[in-house]
């Protein structure tokens, strides 16, 4: 038995050690690693009816990935313009949502992290409560507000700012607002955690030296909060790109989210391998994108999730 | 006192990767003894304790308790109880639940446990405090609860890992007396880990002085203090002045050494090194501050040292004189305050006198860090 | 001057921020009490409680709640257990493996929920086939798959919560218990678990809420056991009714209530602890009395205010009989609708005349101009429900200017708008 395992069982006892190790292995291998590998494998197989699975036709193929790029064989276009456009639009929109959230949340994270007093805890509760409400209901709430006879249109038309209802949904404003809304907390908390640990004296010192407030943030607070910022941005980006509920409820009828394509492949077209391939593309692209960004801003993986 | 259960370490090696924490330790601890491991932090004494209590497996060698090899026996099966450095009282349990935890494990009833807790609380002079939480007690009280909790398990050997280090000086001195009393009352073997030579000297029947995983000397307190084996033991236990030099001449149990600074001086060779130190060897001579006296001006010979006084200080019970010494170190002289008048010697040369039996000669070696 | 400007802008910013955060929830809650068949705040019609009644008669919602509770319970047990094991492993794993291990167990938080759902479905389907089991086996059961899929990432959240507390645990406590004769299991149950209890409780609540509201993963795995969230999504996607607002109101009220209660309890514990530190044992017994529950405890005050307000609103809504009001509104609507229909007729007549004139001019060249496509544009989003209540929707839409020929659907279809102008 290797030294590590021997120490482990010495420390935890045979019974407890086995239970801990068993649960960890089940989680990491049975729930995390194998399903992902299985999905990867599946994405390289043709869509076959159940009896033919494992049969002679069940061979590895790049067909599902080709489909995303070139579209159906014998299709009229040389590229699968529809799906590719959805794909890139999803990524771009997720980036926009992330930036929007960062700008919106940085001040509040800074404010909460650096001020003292009992009202901070009430603010914290006010932040957390929306996060406890069902994702669908939050999207539904925005649907009520952004609807053509919703509060906003009523308000603006009442004020005479515009006189025909503005279609927030078709213009995707409702969608972006909803995605931003959904992940506010995930942006604030990592930043808040880091900024809270920043010694207020550092800011005082910078102010003493005559630095204007924007410079204090640029040179002192933001470099310090970088792990929190990157952690928050990563989570918001991944979750927005992978969101399904908000696009389904708030998205305009003609603009799809990439996850909706995956959903269609699974539930409407019943083409699991194709859906798995799309899921793999989404996962890999998001991970590569996040890694590239982390490289660009010089952040470590270990900072994520803190 | 031989009624208690003894502990033996035989050729004990403990390694962590490439690092050797304990190097070939051989110790026999008699049953019923109060035995201390004394050494600076990081010398491996806690490692030895963990090997005895069963949290660590020795890399080589054996741990025997009551003559029985303990290999493969877990900490919960050994007849030992450990008092942790931070005490490790269970914060969510009341004092009486803490004390009788070992009975709870064995399935004793609450009434039995309460009764036993009350007895032990009386013994540690905390009657009626059983329903408090550990966090509501003072440092000294927590200390006593930890001892009661360990004693409740009725161990054959009680292991104590620097349990007094968190207390303030007054309390520490008080607890020394108390620990010794408790040990004599229950009559079991105590193994005590400390870096405080005062604690080791006041409480122990025997002391093992440890340095970097090696045991330098095992003896009772007086022997360790008066007749150290090594330069480390001499410099670690109590204050000591060192004189370096080469042995010029060996005369039975005494020797003449040519010191680097103070000419030829005579010293007694420590018992363990008699017959081993030869002429021409590098050696170190140690003289305690209180072993000096001020000699008349102009006196000279092989037990006189002349040096310039750097500064002086009055400490109440003693009067300290610091003179220039060997290798940048000062020579400290402590004269007892018997009501005599002290004149200020700062900047002057004075002559110090010592008796040969108070100058101990050991082979040159590593000194304890200040 | 600069400073006070900064201060004011901070408060303005905070106000806007919390308006964005809480406004939608408030508006949604309010719409639950409006008798309008479409959830809206303006125009206010009548205070009603009917949507709550409708909600509790909806068999699919009730069934969804039941499934959600079962799945939630399963997920809590599995993910707290795995999270605790994962956290324990993290504190003692071989240092060289630590970074890799941490990346693996934290990854599910970042993997899109859709991907987790698919991979769970695909993997267990394959296992099922490998074992030669049928389509109705345990491994392809919706509840099993959903619990497994959700736990994959919820366990990561639990792990983070638990490891934060575990880092403050003194391993010497476990060693002390072992040293006093406890077995490893006894030391775990009697020392570590009680210490971890607050964190385990937080993790369990978090896990349950995460499970309850999960959509992305569940939507692939639920099989024949749709959860409440799935049912809600179906309803919201194909037409929204104030019954959903009613459900939202209940959830919001419960959430606020429990959040405030928890905060008040924490604050009280703090106060008690502070008092305990100062007081001697003799004083402890008598000193802390109930009224001090409120002293310096803003959350407790808010809690009471909130509870009273909720009871008042719900009480009024149930006691109040909106029948007369609804009848009035109906009558008014009918009149308005008639008026609108008249107007529309007139409009169409004019248009027709115009068009005829144009067609006569252009000789039918513009044949393909679309007919008013209000129904299709409308149905895209609100399909079944909206079609049924078309008349009501149309008539209540009083503020819409008449340039919009379909009343409602036009808003969704710019083409129609263009055609009209």
Image (tube, rainbow, N blue to C red):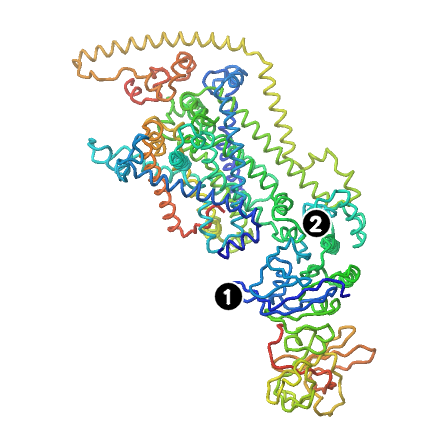
Front in this rendered view, residue A52 or B218? A52
Task: Give the quarter of the image for residue B144.
Answer: bottom right
For label 2, the residue is B102
Q: Which residue is mark 1?
A: B18
Secondary element at tag 1: loop
**Would residue C211 be seen by someone viewing this image from the given angle?**
yes
User: From what the image shows, is residue C229 above or below residue B364?
Assistant: above
Q: Residue furthest right?
A: B339
Above or below residue B62? Residue B260 is: below
User: Residue A177 versus residue B217: which sits nearer the camera?
Assistant: B217
Q: Mark 2 or mark 1: which comes first in sequence?
A: 1
Q: How many neighbours does mark 2 have within 10 angstroms: few (below 14), some (14-19), or many (20 or more)?
A: many
Mark 1, chain letter? B
Above or below — where is A145 with respect to A54?
A: above
Q: Nearer the viewer, mark 2 or mark 1?
A: 2
Residue appearing at x 50%, y 8% in the figure: C328
Q: Is residue A99 visible?
A: no
Say whether residue B324 is left or right of residue A64: right
Measured from the top left, where is residue A21 in percent x and y? 51, 47
């Amino acid at each position: 038995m290797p030294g590590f395992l021997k120490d482990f069982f010495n420390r935890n006892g045979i019974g407890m050690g086995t239970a801990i190790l068993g649960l960890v292995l089940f989680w990491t291998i049975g729930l995390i690693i194998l399903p992902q590998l299985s999905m990867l494998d599946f994405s390289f197989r043709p869509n076959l009816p159940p009896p033919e699975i494992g049969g002679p036709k069940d061979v590895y193929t790049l067909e599902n990935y080709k489909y995303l790029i070139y579209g159906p064989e014998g299709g009229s276009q040389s590229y699968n313009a529809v799906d590719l456009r959805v794909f890139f639009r999803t990524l771009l929109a997720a980036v926009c949502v992330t930036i929007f959230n960062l700008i919106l949340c940085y001040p509040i994270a800074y404010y909460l992290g650096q001020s003292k007093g009992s009202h901070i805890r009430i603010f914290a509760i006010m932040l957390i409560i929306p996060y406890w409400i069902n994702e669908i209901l939050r999207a539904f709430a925005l649907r009520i507000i952004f609807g053509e006879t919703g509060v906003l249109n009523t308000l603006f038309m009442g004020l005479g700012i515009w006189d025909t209802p503005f279609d927030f949904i078709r213009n995707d404003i409702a969608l972006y607002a909803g995605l931003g809304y959904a992940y506010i907390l995930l942006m604030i908390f990592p930043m808040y955690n880091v900024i809270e640990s920043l010694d207020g004296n550092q800011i005082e010192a910078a102010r003493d030296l005559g630095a204007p407030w924007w410079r204090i943030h640029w040179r002192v607070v933001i470099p310090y909060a970088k792990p929190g910022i990157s952690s928050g941005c990563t989570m918001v980006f991944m979750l927005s790109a992978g969101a399904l509920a908000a696009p389904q409820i708030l998205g305009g009828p003609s603009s799809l989210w990439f996850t909706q394509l995956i959903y269609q492949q699974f539930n409407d077209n019943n083409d699991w391998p194709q859906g798995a391939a799309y899921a793999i593309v989404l996962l890999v692209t998001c991970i590569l994108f996040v890694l590239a960004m982390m490289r660009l801003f010089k952040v470590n993986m270990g900072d994520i999730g803190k | 006192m031989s009624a208690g259960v003894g502990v033996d370490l035989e050729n004990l090696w403990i390694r962590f990767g490439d690092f050797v924490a304990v190097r070939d330790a051989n110790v026999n601890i008699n049953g019923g003894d109060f035995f201390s491991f004394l050494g600076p932090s990081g010398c491996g004494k806690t490692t030895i304790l963990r090997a005895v209590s069963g949290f660590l497996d020795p890399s080589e060698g054996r741990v025997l308790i009551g003559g029985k090899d303990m290999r493969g026996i877990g900490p919960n099966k050994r007849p030992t109880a450990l008092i942790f450095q931070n005490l490790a009282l269970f914060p969510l349990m009341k004092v009486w639940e803490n004390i009788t935890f070992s009975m709870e494990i064995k399935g004793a009833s609450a009434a039995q446990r309460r009764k036993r807790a009350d007895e032990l609380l009386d013994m540690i002079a905390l009657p009626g405090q059983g329903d408090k939480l550990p966090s509501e007690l003072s440092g000294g009280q927590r200390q006593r609860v930890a001892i009661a909790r360990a004693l409740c398990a009725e161990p054959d050997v009680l292991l104590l890992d620097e349990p007094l280090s968190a207390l303030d000086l007054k309390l520490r001195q008080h607890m020394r007396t108390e620990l010794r009393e408790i040990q004599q009352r229950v009559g079991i073997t105590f193994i005590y880990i400390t870096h405080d030579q005062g604690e080791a000297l006041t409480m122990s029947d025997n002391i093992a002085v440890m340095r970097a995983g090696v045991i330098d000397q095992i003896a009772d307190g007086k022997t360790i203090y008066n007749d150290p084996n090594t330069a480390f033991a001499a410099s670690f236990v109590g204050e000591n002045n060192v004189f370096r030099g080469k042995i010029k001449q060996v005369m039975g149990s005494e020797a003449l050494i040519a010191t680097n600074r103070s000419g030829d001086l005579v010293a007694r060779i420590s018992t363990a090194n008699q017959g081993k130190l030869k002429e021409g060897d590098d050696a170190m001579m140690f003289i305690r501050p209180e072993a000096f006296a001020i000699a008349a001006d102009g006196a000279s010979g092989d037990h006189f040292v002349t040096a310039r006084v750097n500064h002086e200080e009055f400490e109440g019970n003693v009067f300290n004189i610091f003179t220039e010494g060997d290798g940048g170190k000062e020579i400290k002289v402590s004269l007892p305050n018997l009501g005599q008048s002290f004149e200020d010697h700062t900047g002057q040369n004075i002559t110090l006198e010592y008796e040969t039996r108070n100058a101990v000669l050991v082979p040159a070696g590593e000194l304890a860090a200040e | 001057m600069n400073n006070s400007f900064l201060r004011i802008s901070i408060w303005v910013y905070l106000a806007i921020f919390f308006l964005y955060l809480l406004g939608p929830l408030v508006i949604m809650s309010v719409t639950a009490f409006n008798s309008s068949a479409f959830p809206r705040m303006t125009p206010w019609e009548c205070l009603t409680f009917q949507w709550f009644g409708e909600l509790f008669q909806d068999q699919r919602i009730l069934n969804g709640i039941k499934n959600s509770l079962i799945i939630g319970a399963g997920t809590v047990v599995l993910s707290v257990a795995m999270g605790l094991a994962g956290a324990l492993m993290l504190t003692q794993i071989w240092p060289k493996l630590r970074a890799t291990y941490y990346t693996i167990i934290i990854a599910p938080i970042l993997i899109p929920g859709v991907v987790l759902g698919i991979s769970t479905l695909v993997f267990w389907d394959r296992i099922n086939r490998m074992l030669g089991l049928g389509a109705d086996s345990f491994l392809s059961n919706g509840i099993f798959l959903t619990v497994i899929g959700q736990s994959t990432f919820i366990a990561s959240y639990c792990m983070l919560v638990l490891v934060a507390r575990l880092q403050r645990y003194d391993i010497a406590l476990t060693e002390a218990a072992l040293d006093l004769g406890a077995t490893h299991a006894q030391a775990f149950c009697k020392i570590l678990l009680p210490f971890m209890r607050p964190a385990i409780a937080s993790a369990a609540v978090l896990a349950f809420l995460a499970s309850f509201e999960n959509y992305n993963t569940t939507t692939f795995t639920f099989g024949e056991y749709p959860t409440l969230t799935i049912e809600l999504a179906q309803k919201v996607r194909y037409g929204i009714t104030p019954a959903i607002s009613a459900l939202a109101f209940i959830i919001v009220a419960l959430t606020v209530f429990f959040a405030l209660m928890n905060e008040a309890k924490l604050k009280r514990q703090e106060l008690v602890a502070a008092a305990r530190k100062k007081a001697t044992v003799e004083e402890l017994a008598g000193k802390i009395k109930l009224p001090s529950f409120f002293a310096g405890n803003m959350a407790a005050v808010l809690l009471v205010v909130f509870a009273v307000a909720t009871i008042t609103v719900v009480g009024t809504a149930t006691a109040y009989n909106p029948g007369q009001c609804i009848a009035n509104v109906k009558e008014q609507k009918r009149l308005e609708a008639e008026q609108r229909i008249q107007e529309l007729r007139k409009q169409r007549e004019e248009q027709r005349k115009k068009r005829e004139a144009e067609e006569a001019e252009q000789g039918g060249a513009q044949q393909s101009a679309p007919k008013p496509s209000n129904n299709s544009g409308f149905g895209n989003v609100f399909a079944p429900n909206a079609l049924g209540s078309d008349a009501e929707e149309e008539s209540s839409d009083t503020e819409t200017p008449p340039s919009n020929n379909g009343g409602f659907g036009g808003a969704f279809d710019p083409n129609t708008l263009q055609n009209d102008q």
